[in-house]
Amino acid sequence: MVRYAFALRGQAKDQGHEIRIKEQPVEIIKAKEQLSEHYMCDINANGEVPVLVPLDSGKPIPESVDITKHLAESYPSMIPDSCGSEIKQLIYELHGISFFAFTFAGKPQGIQATKARLEGLQKEPISDQYRAAIDIKLQRLKEKKFAVLTPQASKKNEEYAAQLMTRLESLLNAWQTPWLFGLERPSALDAHLLVFIARMQDVGRGDVIPEALKKYGEKAMNGPEWHEVMQGRHTSPL
């Protein structure tokens, strides 16, 4: 979502606000580099991607929403003033959906492997700082990952997603334009929503997406920015 939002960023406020991003891939499936001591203690205590490390402050910014808001401070069309509060609220609500639950429903093996990896590390001679980070990560897995895979939580998540998608479809239909809120170019909300639409289709849950949003997604995903970011790949690691 961050990479696509940045690809759609538009013009910076001025030359001094231009941002260059150097991407550093993190192998999260087999090598699980996000669980290394360096990553969890120095880069992102959540042990997740994405994370943005600004060179001026050096203080990492985790979470897609926070990174997007940071970038939008330099690129106004990402969250334009005309509808900025609505866009921020809807991005927040969109991320209220557990993408993890949709992606890994009925497939707990990946998260169980992460848990086992962390518990194995706890038995090794590691630093106190790393041990504390692992404790926090294990608690996060319990609260943020395992908890959302229960049948009750999954049902609630699907109901919430369906309601929000219906609202967004109505918003799109109300404007009758390629982008939400009748904007001339896509905002950060469009970027995040389009990736969610693609994720649902990639994991076989296209039923979550209303027809109008599917058509909106198809058009955007034929654009050069989408191809630049995705390069023919899926949004899901599965």
Image: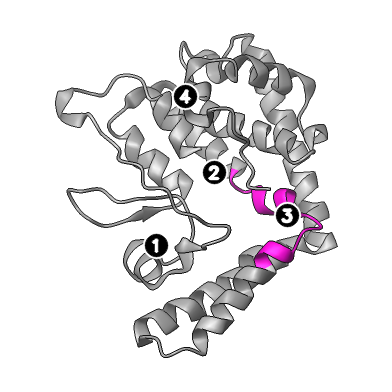
The span from disc 3 to disc 4 (Cα, nearest Å) is: 27 Å
Residue at the spot of label 1:
44
- Tell me the residue that label 3 is attached to: 104
Residue indicated by mark 4 = 228
Q: Earlier in the sequence, mark 4 or mark 1?
A: 1
Depth check: give the residue in front, 92 or 147: 147
Numbered disc in front, either 4 or 2: 4
Quarter-of-image position of residue 212: top right
The image's mark for residue 113 is none
Q: Residue at x 61, y 12 (%)?
A: 175
* Residue 174 on image: x %, y %: 66, 14
Type of amino acid under label 1:
Asn
Residue depth check, mark 4 versus mark 1: number of the one nearer the observer: 4
Q: CA distance from mark 1 to mark 2?
A: 21 Å
The magenta stretch spans which residues?
95-111
Marks 4 and 2, Cα distance to the nearest angstrom?
A: 26 Å
Q: Nearer the viewer, residue 115 or 211?
A: 115
Residue 80 is at least partly visible in this image: no
Q: Which mark is residue 92?
A: 2
Q: Nearer the viewer, residue 52 or 161?
A: 52
Ranked by sequence position, the earlier of labels 4 and 2 is 2
Which kind of residue does numbered mark 3 sit on?
Phe
